[in-house]
Amino acid sequence: MTGYIRRMAFSAGWGPAFAGSFIRIVDDRGRKHEWRGPPQRIVSLVPSDTYSLVRLGARERLVGRTRYCVAPAEGVEDIELVGGTKDADVDRIVALDPEVVVANQEENSQRDIERLDAAGLRVLVSFPRRVADGVAHLARLARLLGHSAAPPAAARPAAPDGGAPAPPPPPAVAREQVATAYRVHAAAEARRRERPPLRAFVPIWMDPLMTVHGDTFISDMLDLAGAQNVFEDRPRRYPLAADLGKAPPLPPERVQGRDLRYPRVTLDEVIARAPDIVLLPDEPHAFTDADAAIFRSLDIPAARRGHVIRCDGKDLMWYGARALEGLSRLREIIDAARP
Protein backbone atom coordinates (compact mmCIF):
# COMPACT_ATOMS: atom_id res chain seq x y z
CA MET A 1 0.00 0.00 0.00
CA THR A 2 1.54 3.33 -1.05
CA GLY A 3 1.77 6.29 1.32
CA TYR A 4 -1.02 8.12 -0.53
CA ILE A 5 -3.36 5.15 -0.40
CA ARG A 6 -2.55 4.46 3.24
CA ARG A 7 -3.23 8.05 4.29
CA MET A 8 -6.49 8.23 2.38
CA ALA A 9 -7.65 4.82 3.57
CA PHE A 10 -7.01 5.65 7.20
CA SER A 11 -8.77 9.01 6.82
CA ALA A 12 -11.85 7.06 5.71
CA GLY A 13 -11.68 4.76 8.71
CA TRP A 14 -10.44 1.76 6.72
CA GLY A 15 -7.33 -0.19 7.60
CA PRO A 16 -5.68 -2.35 10.22
CA ALA A 17 -5.25 0.53 12.67
CA PHE A 18 -9.04 0.66 13.06
CA ALA A 19 -9.59 -3.07 13.54
CA GLY A 20 -11.26 -4.24 16.74
CA SER A 21 -14.35 -5.85 18.16
CA PHE A 22 -16.40 -2.66 17.66
CA ILE A 23 -16.98 -0.90 14.36
CA ARG A 24 -17.41 2.85 14.73
CA ILE A 25 -18.32 4.99 11.73
CA VAL A 26 -19.37 8.63 11.30
CA ASP A 27 -21.70 9.24 8.34
CA ASP A 28 -22.01 12.37 6.21
CA ARG A 29 -24.66 13.79 8.53
CA GLY A 30 -22.06 13.71 11.28
CA ARG A 31 -23.91 10.93 13.12
CA LYS A 32 -21.85 8.36 14.96
CA HIS A 33 -22.77 4.70 14.52
CA GLU A 34 -21.42 1.69 16.36
CA TRP A 35 -21.73 -2.06 15.81
CA ARG A 36 -20.31 -4.87 17.92
CA GLY A 37 -19.25 -6.64 14.74
CA PRO A 38 -19.74 -6.45 10.96
CA PRO A 39 -23.48 -6.15 10.16
CA GLN A 40 -24.93 -9.30 8.61
CA ARG A 41 -28.27 -7.84 7.49
CA ILE A 42 -28.02 -4.78 5.22
CA VAL A 43 -30.66 -2.84 3.29
CA SER A 44 -29.34 -0.54 0.56
CA LEU A 45 -31.48 2.30 -0.75
CA VAL A 46 -28.82 3.59 -3.14
CA PRO A 47 -28.09 1.90 -6.50
CA SER A 48 -24.40 2.83 -6.51
CA ASP A 49 -23.98 1.61 -2.92
CA THR A 50 -25.70 -1.67 -3.75
CA TYR A 51 -23.22 -2.08 -6.59
CA SER A 52 -20.29 -1.27 -4.30
CA LEU A 53 -21.47 -3.64 -1.57
CA VAL A 54 -21.69 -6.52 -4.03
CA ARG A 55 -18.24 -5.71 -5.39
CA LEU A 56 -16.94 -5.65 -1.81
CA GLY A 57 -18.14 -9.23 -1.34
CA ALA A 58 -21.25 -8.49 0.73
CA ARG A 59 -23.89 -9.99 -1.59
CA GLU A 60 -25.05 -12.51 1.02
CA ARG A 61 -25.58 -9.77 3.60
CA LEU A 62 -27.95 -7.70 1.46
CA VAL A 63 -31.55 -8.40 2.49
CA GLY A 64 -33.21 -5.45 0.73
CA ARG A 65 -32.71 -3.12 -2.23
CA THR A 66 -34.69 -0.58 -4.25
CA ARG A 67 -36.14 -1.32 -7.66
CA TYR A 68 -33.43 0.93 -9.12
CA CYS A 69 -30.65 -1.20 -7.64
CA VAL A 70 -30.21 -3.26 -10.80
CA ALA A 71 -26.45 -3.73 -11.03
CA PRO A 72 -24.51 -5.88 -11.06
CA ALA A 73 -27.42 -7.84 -12.56
CA GLU A 74 -26.04 -11.22 -11.58
CA GLY A 75 -25.60 -10.08 -7.99
CA VAL A 76 -28.89 -8.41 -7.07
CA GLU A 77 -31.77 -10.16 -8.82
CA ASP A 78 -32.67 -12.34 -5.80
CA ILE A 79 -32.52 -9.54 -3.21
CA GLU A 80 -35.93 -8.43 -1.92
CA LEU A 81 -37.33 -5.15 -3.25
CA VAL A 82 -38.25 -2.46 -0.72
CA GLY A 83 -39.71 0.27 -2.96
CA GLY A 84 -37.83 3.02 -4.76
CA THR A 85 -35.17 5.54 -3.90
CA LYS A 86 -37.76 8.27 -3.29
CA ASP A 87 -40.59 6.06 -2.01
CA ALA A 88 -39.03 3.38 0.14
CA ASP A 89 -41.35 0.87 1.81
CA VAL A 90 -40.37 1.80 5.34
CA ASP A 91 -42.65 -0.75 6.99
CA ARG A 92 -41.14 -3.56 4.93
CA ILE A 93 -37.61 -2.37 5.71
CA VAL A 94 -38.37 -2.36 9.43
CA ALA A 95 -39.82 -5.88 9.13
CA LEU A 96 -36.59 -7.11 7.54
CA ASP A 97 -34.81 -6.13 10.77
CA PRO A 98 -31.60 -4.83 9.16
CA GLU A 99 -28.57 -3.98 11.25
CA VAL A 100 -27.91 -1.02 8.95
CA VAL A 101 -29.72 0.85 6.18
CA VAL A 102 -27.42 2.47 3.64
CA ALA A 103 -28.90 5.72 2.28
CA ASN A 104 -27.90 8.91 0.48
CA GLN A 105 -28.85 12.45 1.45
CA GLU A 106 -29.55 13.47 -2.13
CA GLU A 107 -30.95 10.28 -3.63
CA ASN A 108 -33.37 9.26 -0.88
CA SER A 109 -36.25 11.29 0.50
CA GLN A 110 -35.67 13.07 3.78
CA ARG A 111 -39.04 11.83 4.99
CA ASP A 112 -38.08 8.18 4.50
CA ILE A 113 -34.73 8.68 6.25
CA GLU A 114 -36.46 10.36 9.19
CA ARG A 115 -39.02 7.54 9.45
CA LEU A 116 -36.24 4.95 9.45
CA ASP A 117 -34.43 6.94 12.14
CA ALA A 118 -37.62 7.12 14.17
CA ALA A 119 -38.04 3.36 13.88
CA GLY A 120 -34.74 2.93 15.65
CA LEU A 121 -32.76 1.66 12.66
CA ARG A 122 -29.16 2.65 12.06
CA VAL A 123 -29.18 4.69 8.85
CA LEU A 124 -25.75 5.30 7.34
CA VAL A 125 -26.14 8.39 5.13
CA SER A 126 -23.62 9.45 2.48
CA PHE A 127 -23.34 12.64 0.43
CA PRO A 128 -20.23 12.55 -1.80
CA ARG A 129 -19.67 15.66 -3.92
CA ARG A 130 -16.28 14.67 -5.31
CA VAL A 131 -14.87 11.47 -6.76
CA ALA A 132 -12.47 11.35 -3.82
CA ASP A 133 -15.49 11.46 -1.49
CA GLY A 134 -16.93 8.47 -3.30
CA VAL A 135 -13.69 6.52 -2.90
CA ALA A 136 -13.60 7.39 0.80
CA HIS A 137 -17.19 6.18 1.12
CA LEU A 138 -16.25 2.91 -0.57
CA ALA A 139 -13.55 2.52 2.07
CA ARG A 140 -16.12 3.34 4.74
CA LEU A 141 -18.37 0.56 3.45
CA ALA A 142 -15.41 -1.82 3.57
CA ARG A 143 -14.86 -0.73 7.17
CA LEU A 144 -18.54 -1.42 7.87
CA LEU A 145 -18.11 -4.92 6.49
CA GLY A 146 -15.10 -5.59 8.68
CA HIS A 147 -12.52 -5.22 5.87
CA SER A 148 -14.22 -7.93 3.80
CA ALA A 149 -14.77 -10.33 6.67
CA ALA A 150 -17.37 -12.90 5.66
CA PRO A 151 -20.40 -13.65 7.84
CA PRO A 152 -19.95 -16.63 10.15
CA ALA A 153 -21.13 -19.95 8.80
CA ALA A 154 -24.26 -19.93 10.97
CA ALA A 155 -25.36 -16.59 9.45
CA ARG A 156 -24.77 -17.52 5.82
CA PRO A 157 -27.63 -19.00 3.80
CA ALA A 158 -27.69 -22.72 3.22
CA ALA A 159 -27.04 -24.13 -0.22
CA PRO A 160 -30.17 -24.74 -2.35
CA ASP A 161 -29.98 -28.46 -1.63
CA GLY A 162 -30.03 -27.84 2.10
CA GLY A 163 -26.35 -28.62 2.49
CA ALA A 164 -23.59 -26.60 4.03
CA PRO A 165 -23.74 -22.78 3.95
CA ALA A 166 -22.39 -21.11 0.82
CA PRO A 167 -18.64 -20.38 1.03
CA PRO A 168 -17.61 -16.86 2.01
CA PRO A 169 -16.08 -14.48 -0.51
CA PRO A 170 -12.29 -14.43 -0.68
CA PRO A 171 -10.97 -12.60 2.40
CA ALA A 172 -9.06 -10.05 0.31
CA VAL A 173 -12.03 -8.94 -1.82
CA ALA A 174 -12.85 -5.68 -0.02
CA ARG A 175 -9.25 -4.73 0.69
CA GLU A 176 -8.26 -5.18 -2.94
CA GLN A 177 -11.35 -3.33 -4.21
CA VAL A 178 -10.62 -0.32 -2.03
CA ALA A 179 -6.88 -0.33 -2.71
CA THR A 180 -7.59 -0.48 -6.46
CA ALA A 181 -10.03 2.43 -6.16
CA TYR A 182 -7.41 4.58 -4.45
CA ARG A 183 -4.79 3.65 -7.06
CA VAL A 184 -7.11 4.47 -9.96
CA HIS A 185 -8.10 7.78 -8.38
CA ALA A 186 -4.49 8.73 -7.66
CA ALA A 187 -3.51 7.96 -11.25
CA ALA A 188 -6.41 10.04 -12.57
CA GLU A 189 -5.45 12.95 -10.32
CA ALA A 190 -1.92 12.78 -11.67
CA ARG A 191 -3.26 12.96 -15.24
CA ARG A 192 -5.83 15.66 -14.49
CA ARG A 193 -3.71 18.56 -15.83
CA GLU A 194 -1.63 16.76 -18.44
CA ARG A 195 -3.83 18.04 -21.28
CA PRO A 196 -6.10 21.07 -21.60
CA PRO A 197 -9.63 20.13 -20.57
CA LEU A 198 -12.30 19.74 -23.25
CA ARG A 199 -15.31 21.99 -22.69
CA ALA A 200 -18.28 19.74 -21.93
CA PHE A 201 -22.02 20.12 -21.43
CA VAL A 202 -23.91 17.40 -19.57
CA PRO A 203 -27.66 17.87 -19.26
CA ILE A 204 -29.43 15.72 -16.69
CA TRP A 205 -33.02 16.52 -17.75
CA MET A 206 -34.58 17.66 -20.99
CA ASP A 207 -37.87 19.33 -20.10
CA PRO A 208 -37.04 21.49 -18.27
CA LEU A 209 -33.45 21.50 -19.50
CA MET A 210 -31.25 21.04 -16.43
CA THR A 211 -27.53 20.61 -15.87
CA VAL A 212 -25.01 20.58 -13.01
CA HIS A 213 -22.97 23.15 -11.11
CA GLY A 214 -19.29 22.64 -10.35
CA ASP A 215 -20.05 21.57 -6.77
CA THR A 216 -21.31 18.15 -7.85
CA PHE A 217 -19.95 14.64 -8.19
CA ILE A 218 -20.76 14.70 -11.93
CA SER A 219 -18.75 17.85 -12.54
CA ASP A 220 -15.74 16.48 -10.67
CA MET A 221 -16.01 13.19 -12.58
CA LEU A 222 -15.90 15.17 -15.84
CA ASP A 223 -12.86 17.09 -14.68
CA LEU A 224 -11.07 13.93 -13.61
CA ALA A 225 -11.73 12.41 -17.04
CA GLY A 226 -10.27 15.39 -18.91
CA ALA A 227 -13.23 17.74 -19.45
CA GLN A 228 -14.46 21.01 -18.01
CA ASN A 229 -18.10 21.53 -17.12
CA VAL A 230 -19.15 24.63 -19.07
CA PHE A 231 -21.77 25.42 -16.42
CA GLU A 232 -19.50 24.90 -13.40
CA ASP A 233 -20.02 28.51 -12.32
CA ARG A 234 -23.77 28.61 -12.93
CA PRO A 235 -25.89 28.19 -9.76
CA ARG A 236 -29.58 27.55 -9.78
CA ARG A 237 -31.52 30.77 -9.39
CA TYR A 238 -34.83 31.34 -7.73
CA PRO A 239 -37.62 31.83 -8.73
CA LEU A 240 -37.98 29.77 -11.91
CA ALA A 241 -38.25 32.88 -14.07
CA ALA A 242 -34.85 34.02 -12.77
CA ASP A 243 -33.30 30.66 -13.65
CA LEU A 244 -34.53 31.17 -17.20
CA GLY A 245 -33.25 34.76 -17.39
CA LYS A 246 -36.71 36.34 -17.28
CA ALA A 247 -36.61 37.93 -13.84
CA PRO A 248 -34.05 39.10 -11.26
CA PRO A 249 -32.89 36.38 -8.85
CA LEU A 250 -33.71 36.40 -5.18
CA PRO A 251 -30.88 37.67 -2.94
CA PRO A 252 -28.68 35.05 -1.21
CA GLU A 253 -30.42 35.46 2.15
CA ARG A 254 -33.73 34.46 0.52
CA VAL A 255 -32.42 31.16 -0.83
CA GLN A 256 -30.45 29.88 2.15
CA GLY A 257 -30.89 26.16 2.62
CA ARG A 258 -31.91 25.51 -0.98
CA ASP A 259 -29.88 23.33 -3.31
CA LEU A 260 -28.30 25.61 -5.94
CA ARG A 261 -26.33 22.90 -7.75
CA TYR A 262 -28.78 21.89 -10.49
CA PRO A 263 -29.65 24.92 -12.63
CA ARG A 264 -32.31 25.04 -15.30
CA VAL A 265 -30.76 26.54 -18.41
CA THR A 266 -31.84 27.61 -21.88
CA LEU A 267 -30.57 26.49 -25.27
CA ASP A 268 -29.34 30.05 -25.80
CA GLU A 269 -27.13 29.62 -22.73
CA VAL A 270 -25.79 26.35 -24.12
CA ILE A 271 -24.90 28.13 -27.38
CA ALA A 272 -23.19 30.95 -25.46
CA ARG A 273 -21.09 28.45 -23.47
CA ALA A 274 -19.89 26.80 -26.71
CA PRO A 275 -19.20 23.23 -25.51
CA ASP A 276 -16.81 21.05 -27.51
CA ILE A 277 -18.69 17.91 -26.48
CA VAL A 278 -22.22 17.21 -25.30
CA LEU A 279 -22.66 14.05 -23.25
CA LEU A 280 -26.22 12.74 -22.99
CA PRO A 281 -26.49 10.20 -20.15
CA ASP A 282 -29.20 7.54 -19.97
CA GLU A 283 -30.17 8.53 -16.41
CA PRO A 284 -31.81 10.17 -14.53
CA HIS A 285 -33.45 11.18 -17.83
CA ALA A 286 -33.01 8.72 -20.68
CA PHE A 287 -32.04 11.07 -23.50
CA THR A 288 -33.45 9.98 -26.86
CA ASP A 289 -32.41 10.36 -30.49
CA ALA A 290 -34.93 13.20 -30.72
CA ASP A 291 -33.23 14.95 -27.79
CA ALA A 292 -29.83 14.46 -29.42
CA ALA A 293 -31.14 15.97 -32.66
CA ILE A 294 -32.00 19.19 -30.81
CA PHE A 295 -28.44 19.61 -29.58
CA ARG A 296 -27.03 18.65 -32.98
CA SER A 297 -29.03 21.51 -34.50
CA LEU A 298 -27.35 24.12 -32.29
CA ASP A 299 -24.54 26.37 -33.46
CA ILE A 300 -21.95 24.94 -31.07
CA PRO A 301 -18.56 23.27 -31.67
CA ALA A 302 -19.86 19.92 -30.41
CA ALA A 303 -22.58 19.83 -33.06
CA ARG A 304 -20.32 20.99 -35.88
CA ARG A 305 -17.75 18.29 -35.09
CA GLY A 306 -20.21 15.47 -34.49
CA HIS A 307 -19.55 15.28 -30.76
CA VAL A 308 -23.07 15.07 -29.35
CA ILE A 309 -22.74 11.66 -27.75
CA ARG A 310 -25.01 9.46 -25.67
CA CYS A 311 -23.26 7.76 -22.76
CA ASP A 312 -23.80 5.50 -19.78
CA GLY A 313 -25.06 7.64 -16.91
CA LYS A 314 -23.67 5.23 -14.34
CA ASP A 315 -20.15 6.14 -15.47
CA LEU A 316 -20.86 9.76 -14.55
CA MET A 317 -23.07 9.46 -11.50
CA TRP A 318 -22.59 6.23 -9.58
CA TYR A 319 -19.98 7.03 -6.95
CA GLY A 320 -17.88 4.28 -5.40
CA ALA A 321 -16.80 1.13 -7.21
CA ARG A 322 -18.80 1.86 -10.39
CA ALA A 323 -17.32 5.33 -10.90
CA LEU A 324 -13.77 4.05 -10.81
CA GLU A 325 -14.68 1.37 -13.35
CA GLY A 326 -16.30 3.98 -15.61
CA LEU A 327 -13.52 6.55 -15.48
CA SER A 328 -11.49 5.01 -18.31
CA ARG A 329 -14.59 4.81 -20.53
CA LEU A 330 -15.35 8.49 -19.96
CA ARG A 331 -11.75 9.47 -20.66
CA GLU A 332 -11.80 7.47 -23.89
CA ILE A 333 -14.95 9.29 -25.08
CA ILE A 334 -13.51 12.69 -24.17
CA ASP A 335 -10.09 12.04 -25.69
CA ALA A 336 -11.72 10.84 -28.94
CA ALA A 337 -13.48 14.21 -29.23
CA ARG A 338 -10.30 16.26 -29.04
CA PRO A 339 -9.33 18.17 -32.20
Image (cartoon, grey):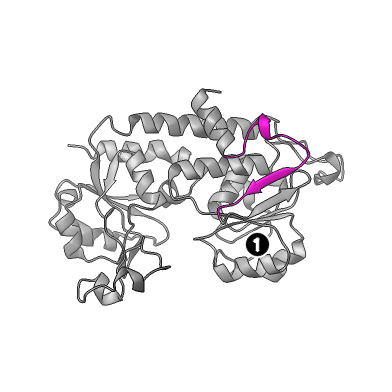
- From the viewer's side, name the closer residue of 32 and 183: 32
Q: Magenta span has 136? A: no
Q: In the displayed structure, does residue 159 sit left or right of residue 187?
A: right
- Quadrant the N terminus occupies: top right
- Quadrant the C terminus occupies: top left
Task: Tell me the residue at 27%/55% (across/down).
Answer: 233
Q: In the displayed structure, does residue 162 sit left or right of residue 213?
A: right
Q: Position of residue 76 (x, y in %)?
A: 63, 51
Q: Amino acid at mark 1?
A: Leu
- From the viewer's side, name the closer residue of 315 and 116: 116
Local secondary structure at mark 1: loop
Q: Position of residue 235 (x, y in %)?
A: 30, 61
In the displayed structure, would residue 195 be above or below residue 223? above
Q: Position of residue 45 (x, y in %)?
A: 60, 58
| Region of the chain picked out in magenta, as a range | 12-28
Q: Residue furthest front?
A: 253
Q: In the displayed structure, does residue 269 sit left or right of residue 169?
A: left
Q: Is residue 224 visible?
A: yes
Q: Position of residue 244 (x, y in %)?
A: 23, 71
User: Callout 1: 10 Å neighbours few (<14), some, many (20+)?
Assistant: many
Disc 1 target residue: 81
Task: Tell me the residue at 24%/51% (across/down).
Answer: 230
Q: Magenta span has 27? A: yes
Q: Is residue 54 visible?
A: no
Occupied quadrant, residue 89: bottom right
Q: Residue furthest top?
A: 2
- From the viewer's side, name the closer residue of 2 and 212: 2
